[in-house]
Image (cartoon, helix red, strand yellow):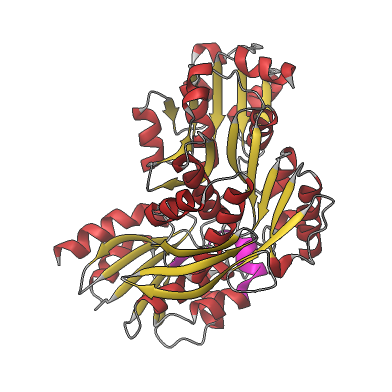
């Protein structure tokens, strides 16, 4: 462990292939805060890459070896190349680094190196991990426990996906077991198996990434393998307790199942916020308030309460933190909120996430017409869950489908947004090309508009917002 930490301390330059990814950008910010030279490549310029550049990182958007900085031309033991599995195998820069014997590690490996030297709280799950990990980090920070946190979204409270404790800022990577770190544990490519947390939360084990796993049983098997690596305590959603095998002590949580160790009761909505009580082994925590929509977020907050209790955070500190939590960018993220029009942007890209997001909107705005714009993400995911996607999208009053965002994939014959549209029973449904989207939406009479997806649909949020605000 000391050798691993010394390796990180001695680095001078860290180069990221895919620096604009939400997980990669958190690592980039971490190394930049530690005084390392940080630069990188990404396929697309985004608001996030602009933010990184403004913070002092050199970023380019063409896969061109000629654009590499001089100190990236020759391998050096003080230079680290970090990449994600989303980078294609034929990527010129990646292959250059490989053929010239650079030190190359996956993002998950680097996160594992950092957390191995810390007291780690990790949150895993097909859905809910970003909000839950952000909630946990916020509660612990509010209680002055000084956590660092690597998050899968931009927290609204702190406007970043990286929290750094003042101790870590001052220590320049001199981490120790006294350091507290909260991380989002990504199941893609079994990345979370690089982590060995003291405490872990598993929020869900629904099938996803079947291009990697092949079958749902292997998804569940990987979560069980992750659970075996938890050192002290596993916090597990009650409804999936029979699907995850763990040698670590387990406590369960639920939104309403009284058989769980932690659960919510007397849930109601007042002033557009949830009011409820949380039953814990320490007693009933009354008058809890959460401003996030959706019962799934109440459940996420119960998981956060369980972790906070394990870490001896007081009931009052937990109550205060939940009340002040403002959520995560692109998680039911209000863009416009007026009497006439509500515009919400959300990262939902799995059928269960779509179902939760759309159901939350219907619950918050009963009687209003819900219009959804959805950009499917990946051909394989669209193929594997086509029927479930159709059922979730049928919950809308009207649906606009964009073409599938391919990310790292090549097209698959017969898999398209039209195929998805044909499976839907909704009457008001259509497909819209990117170039026509803003114009098409501006023609519609809208009450509640939702943009949903994990591709580049987020780049249309500002143009849509601008157009709608002018009407």
In the rendered image, residue 90, in percent from the top left (x then y), is placed at: 64, 37
In this picture, residue 232 sits left or right of residue 382? right
Q: Looking at this view, name the residue that lies furthest to the front.
A: 283
Q: In this view, does 275 lie above or below 308?
A: below
In the rendered image, residue 346, in percent from the top left (x then y), is placed at: 43, 61
* Magenta stretch contains residue 436: no
Q: Is residue 74 above or below residue 84?
A: above
- Quadrant containing the N terminus is top right
Q: Could you say which quadrant of the image residue 438 lies in?
A: bottom left
Q: Can residue 399 be seen in this view?
A: no
Residue at (21, 65) in percent of width and height: 468
Q: Is residue 442 visible?
A: yes
* Magenta stretch contains residue 384: yes
Q: Could you say which quadrant of the image residue 278 lies in?
A: bottom right
In the rendered image, residue 20, in percent from the top left (x then y), is placed at: 47, 38
In the rendered image, residue 336, in percent from the top left (x then y), is placed at: 26, 63
In this picture, residue 401 sits left or right of residue 265? left
Residue at (76, 44) in percent of width and height: 230
The region drawn magenta spans: 374-386
Q: How many labels does the image show?
A: 0
Nearer to the camera, 199 or 384: 199
Residue at (59, 57) in percent of width and height: 303
- Quadrant containing the C terminus is bottom left
Residue at (53, 62) in percent of width and height: 349
């Amino acid at each position: 462990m000391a050798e691993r930490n010394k390796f990180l301390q001695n680095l001078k330059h860290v180069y990221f292939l895919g620096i604009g990814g939400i997980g990669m950008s958190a690592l980039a910010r971490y190394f930049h805060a530690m005084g390392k030279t940080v630069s990188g490549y990404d396929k697309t310029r985004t608001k996030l890459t602009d933010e990184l550049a403004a913070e002092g990182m050199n970023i380019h958007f063409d896969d061109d070896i000629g654009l590499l900085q001089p100190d990236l031309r020759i391998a050096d033991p003080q230079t680290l190349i970090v990449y994600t599995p989303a980078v294609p195998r034929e990527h010129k820069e990646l292959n250059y680094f490989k053929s010239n014997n650079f030190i190359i590690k996956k993002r998950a490996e680097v996160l594992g190196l950092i957390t191995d030297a810390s007291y780690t709280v990790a949150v895993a799950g097909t859905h809910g991990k970003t909000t839950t990990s952000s909630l946990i980090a916020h509660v612990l920070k509010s209680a002055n426990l000084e956590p660092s946190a690597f998050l899968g979204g931009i927290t609204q409270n702190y406007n970043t996906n990286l929290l750094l404790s003042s101790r870590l800022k001052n220590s320049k990577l001199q981490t120790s077991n006294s350091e507290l770190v909260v991380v989002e544990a990504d199941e893609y490519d079994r990345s979370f198996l690089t982590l060995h947390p003291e405490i872990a939360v598993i929020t869900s084990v629904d099938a996803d990434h079947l291009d990697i796993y092949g079958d749902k049983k292997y998804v569940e098997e990987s979560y069980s393998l992750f659970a075996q690596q938890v050192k002290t305590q596993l916090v597990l959603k009650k409804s999936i307790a029979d699907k995850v095998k763990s040698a670590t002590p387990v406590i369960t949580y639920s939104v309403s199942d009284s058989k769980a160790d932690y659960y919510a009761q007397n849930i109601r909505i007042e002033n557009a916020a949830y009011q409820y009580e949380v039953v814990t082994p320490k007693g009933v925590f009354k008058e809890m308030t959460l401003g996030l929509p959706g019962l799934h977020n109440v459940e996420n907050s119960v998981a956060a309460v369980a972790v906070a209790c394990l870490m001896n955070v007081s009931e009052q500190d937990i109550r205060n933190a939940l009340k002040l939590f403002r959520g995560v960018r692109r998680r039911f993220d209000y863009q416009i909120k007026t009497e006439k029009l509500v515009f919400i942007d959300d990262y939902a890209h799995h059928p269960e996430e779509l179902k939760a997001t759309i159901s939350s909107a219907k619950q918050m705005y009963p009687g209003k017409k819900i219009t959804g714009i959805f950009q499917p993400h990946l051909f394989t995911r669209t193929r594997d869950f086509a029927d479930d996607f159709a059922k979730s999208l049928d919950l809308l009053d009207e649906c606009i489908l964009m073409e599938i965002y391919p990310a790292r994939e090549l097209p698959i014959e017969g898999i398209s947004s039209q195929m998805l549209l044909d499976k839907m029973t909704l009457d008001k449904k259509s497909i819209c090309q990117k170039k026509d989207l803003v114009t098409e939406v501006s023609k519609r009479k809208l009450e509640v508009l939702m943009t949903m997806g994990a591709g580049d649909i987020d780049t249309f949020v500002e143009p849509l917002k601008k157009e709608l605000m002018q009407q």
